[in-house]
Image: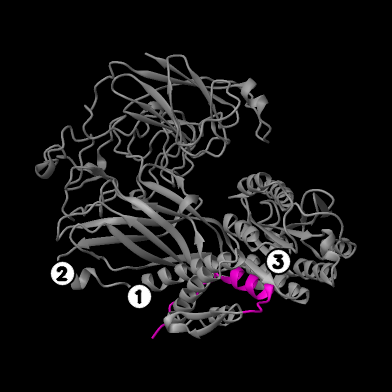
Amino acid sequence: MVSFTCAVHQNPYLPENGTQVDVVVTVTAEADGALPGEKGGTGTGNAAAGERGPDAVEVILLDCSGSMSIGRRIEEARRAAAVAVDTLRDGVAFAVIQGTNRARQVYPNKGLAIVSDRTREEAKTRIGQLQATSGTAIGTWLLAARDLMLTAPGAIHHALLLTDGQNYEAPGAFAAALAACEGVFQCDARGVGDDWNVDELRRIATALLGSVALLREPAGIAADFQAVIQTVMGRGVPDVWLRIWTPRGARIRFVRQVSPQIDELTDRAAAVSDLIRDYPTGAWGSETRDYHVCVDVPPAPVGGRRLAARINLLHGEDTLSTAKVEVLWTDDSAESTRINEVVAHYTGQAELARAIQDGIRARQAGDEDTAAIALGRAAQLASVAGDEDTLARLAKVVDIVDAPTGRVRRREAVEKLDEMDLDASSTMTTGVKMP
Amino acid sequence: MSAVCPEGHLSDTDDWCDTCGSPIAPDTPIAPDRPIAAPTGAGTGPGVAAAGPAGLLGRRAGAAPADLSPTAPQALPPSAPPPSAPSCPVCAEPRSGGRYCEACAYDFETGAAPAAAVPVAIPAHAPAAAEPAVGWVAEVCPDRAFFDRNDDDIAFPDQVTRRAITLVGDRSVIGRRSSRRNIFPEIDLALAPEDRGVSRVHAFLDHTDDGRLAVTDAGSANGTWIGDDASPIPPGRTVPLADGDSFHVGSFTRITVRRT
């Protein structure tokens, strides 16, 4: 089993008439036995696949559009898919889908197969025969995955999507497909080469609670697929929700996952009642995530106290852990103006992600001045957070004159891949540096 | 176990009020088994009414203090020893271990009767047991024609049973009961024949004192469809209903509202 704990980071003091409460909740999940994935490719899975149905479903969505024939893309994609299949745990249900302007199931012929030595080999044989042809309609691939997921209710549902090109679907069709898949499965999206659209894949990753990444070289696909599948196989608890109660008259400004990556959850809420909302967090393994919740509460007189939020972590019908966000009003401004450093750190990380995305959008629109301001601000924020990785990625897109003051200069030759890499990685955050 | 907060709200949580978040003092008296007739702010004296050992008092039907919003996992201690009765005294369904009977929603903890008596949100200012002068009844019935318009993998029930639910208080929730998530809809489509196409909290029926009735979709997965409309109402939009109007939820459920 997995046990969950919550820790609350906040300054509980509000000034007279103050209403805004910022809190970061750190949720830690720890397996107190072996998680399913920890035994590698053998063992526990078979039992789970018995009468209760599979405990996890993995659908691999491979872009086989014409452009995949460039370089060694299709070969590497085939190799990566084979590695992914090898990484699947026995007993998991799986399928491989070839994505073009439609979705064609590669393995099994229909429905889901249960992972075993035999089905792994059969799947790899089919994968080895894949050829690149035709167009790209990512929405139809996602819908095909959804149909398969729905045949195994109660399991952990995950898809891994690889593409190298832009989506040629009516925007409405793509959005509708995405909406239909929301809450049904999680999806990590990967782009290879420099012809895909970061925004498009980020929309998938955001809606389907996954990650997006640029795979610079086709040769890197296999290692990445293996890492993704290993993470998924290590997840033991499907479908965890944050249930947030706030007092009458309160207003939730935002709810946002801030670590390991930024995911806006504000608009994803399901209203349980006037005062209670549920936010999806997907499946969990042994891991730690941070959530920033910002809520306005009705003020109480100085000296008064109030519960600003009660945050329950729910799995199905069980409460896994509870965090209470208590606030008190004070006339001591030394208390009320103090900023909790964890809250400050993640506020900065969210602004950093926004600054990078704004900067890149401005660059693409040819507005170099706006780009320099936004990317300069990004350099400053990354510097404050000690985020060397982001600074290094920024330095390939602008010349950083002085990071702490945010002075940057436009750079003449920027590789498109570097810009895409910066964009795609912008939502990854660093943790709080412990002194 | 309910407590009363300094503002006079009845709260299912006894540390902080589950309505306004005010602290509830450790020595806050246990609430009586009925809503407070008139909250008087600071000087509310529920101690008089709560003369007996409150934990043993049966909650009166229709007066359970279930605001629609209790988060309180501690209100339902999972470790509580199951009462001796192994099956429901009302319908004889074997007890599954939850607080409520799976078949008729009898409340094992309090002995509250099933049907319209399962937790109904009654605002603290409502007269405790007054019969509504102008009332509404919601009639729930599987509807083959509506079912045939959908293509989901839910089966149409073998038996077409009709239920009528008297609407009490000023809001009724249409949904599917989930005892551990503390969702207890007044119109509960988890009852046989269960309609799994209905969201846990699917829609609200608001019935105001002046006799009007309106339905609001709560952001349900499968929508709320007025009459034979070709498209569902947008989530959050409130649609007034008249005597005899009907709407559809889930895979096959038709709800018709009638004045009493």
Image spot of residue B233 (x, y percent): 52, 30
Q: Label 3 to label 2, Cα distance in Å?
A: 52 Å
Determine which residue is flagged by label 1: A341
Q: Which amino acid lies under the numbered mark 2 shown in the image of this protein?
A: Asp
Residue drawn where x is 50% and y is 19% of the image: B246
Image spot of residue A124 (x, y percent): 85, 65
Q: Is residue A335 visible?
A: yes
Question: Toward the viewer: A420 or B2?
Answer: A420
Image spot of residue B40 (x, y percent): 12, 38
Dot 2 lies on which element? loop
The verdict on residue B45 being magenta is no
The chain to which mark 1 is attached is A
Say left or right for A41 vs A75: left
Q: Which mark is residue A191?
A: 3
Say left or right for A218 vs B250: right
Whether tag 3 and tag 1 are in contact, CB under 8 A, the answer is no
* Above or below, B156 relative to B76: above
CA neighbours of label 1 inside 10 A, class few (<14), some (14 to 19), many (20+): few
Q: Which amino acid lies under the numbered mark 3 shown in the image of this protein?
A: Gly
Quadrant that contains the C terminus of chain A = bottom left
Closer to the eye: label 3 or 1: 3
* Above or below, A183 relative to B176: below
Residue drawn where x is 32% and y is 38% of the image: B110
Image spot of residue A9 (x, y percent): 35, 69
Q: Earlier in the sequence, mark 3 or mark 2?
A: 3
Marks 3 & 2 on one chain: yes
* Above or below, B75 relative to A67: above
Q: Residues in magenta? A: A412-435
Determine which residue is flagged by label 2: A332
Dot 3 lies on which element? strand
Q: Earlier in the sequence, mark 3 or mark 1?
A: 3
Please, which residue is most extreme toward the left here? B43
